[in-house]
Image (cartoon, rainbow, N blue to C red):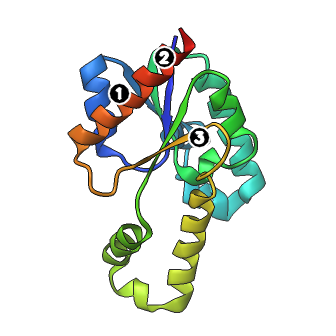
């Protein structure tokens, strides 16, 4: 059985799930369900160590599933041994974008808060953490900067097929 992981884009995941009729599991949503609060609230209230414990608990539960699309953010992917554990069960794909596109989207999402150096530094720190997944062993990067959702799915399918054929 094969499982799917990724760490950047959101909309194509639903198309993938629909096309293959696989169940979608979002790690961050499962963490929020287990904790009974949002991830940011949990981080602020109980600290990062508690959040990582809940993430590992959610991961233990999620890895029991087969034939699912697992969505995980970049910062969650690089925390603890999350990447290694996910890689044990199948390929880990990371959708990435070029820096100018990411910063442009960040600027639009933050609006006027982007002008506040403290707010901007906080968001750039989160981005830097998420980007640390790039270049790690076992991570297959796909640049989705200028791809539509359909093109992204096709690119991933092609990569996945190539990996499957090499194993056979």
Q: In the displayed structure, would residue 17 be above or below residue 71?
A: above
Q: Is residue 22 left or right of residue 31?
A: left
Answer few, some or many: residues within 10 Å of disc 3's Cα (few below 14, many 20 plus, some between 14 and 19).
some
Distance between the Cα atoms at labels 2 and 1?
A: 10 Å
Q: Nearer the viewer, mark 2 or mark 3?
A: 2
Label number found at residue 164: 2
125 is higher (above) or lower (below) than 160: below
Pointer 2 or 1: first along the chain: 1
Circles 2, 1 touching at the beta carbon (< 8 Å): no
x then y, percent, for residue 103: 41, 74
| Mark 2, secondary structure of its residue | helix
Residue at 56 percent across and 87 percent down: it is 118
Residue drawn 35% across and 87% down? Answer: 112
Q: Nearer the viewer, residue 25 or 50?
A: 25
Task: Work out how far the residue at label 3 is from the one at label 1, CA to CA, in angstroms.
Answer: 16 Å
Tell me: 157 left or right of 162: left
Residue labelled with disc 3: 139
**Disc 1 element:** helix
Earlier in the chain: of badge 3 and badge 1, it is 3
Which of the numbered marks, if any, corresponds to residue 157?
Answer: 1
Percent x, y of residue 145: 33, 57
Whether 163 is drawn above or below 149: the answer is above
Residue 102 occupies quadrant? bottom left
Mark 2 and mark 3 in contact? Answer it, CB < 8 Å.
no
Q: Considering depth in this image, is 54 or 140 the residue closer to the camera?
A: 140
- Of the pair 30 and 77, the residue shown nearer to us: 77
Which residue: 30% across, 41% down? 152
Task: Specify the label residue 81 is tagged with.
Answer: none
Alpha carbon separation for disc pair 2 and 3? 16 Å
Name the N-terminal-most of marks 2 and 3: 3
């Amino acid at each position: 059985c094969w499982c799917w992981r990724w760490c950047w884009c959101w909309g194509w995941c639903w198309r993938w799930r629909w096309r293959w009729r696989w169940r979608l599991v979002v790690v961050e949503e499962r963490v929020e369900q287990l904790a009974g609060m949002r991830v940011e609230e949990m981080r602020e209230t109980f600290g990062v160590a508690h959040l990582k414990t809940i993430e590992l608990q959610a991961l233990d539960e999620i890895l029991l599933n087969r034939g699912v699309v697992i969505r995980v953010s970049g910062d969650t992917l690089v925390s603890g041994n999350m990447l290694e554990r996910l890689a044990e069960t199948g390929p880990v794909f990371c959708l990435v974008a070029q820096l100018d596109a990411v910063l442009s989207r960040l600027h639009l999402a933050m609006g006027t808060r982007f002008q506040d150096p403290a707010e901007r530094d906080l968001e750039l720190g989160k981005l830097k953490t998420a980007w640390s997944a790039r270049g790690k062993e076992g991570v297959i990067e796909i640049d989705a900067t200028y791809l539509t959702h359909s093109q992204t799915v096709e690119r991933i399918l092609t990569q996945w097929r190539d990996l499957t054929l090499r194993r056979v």
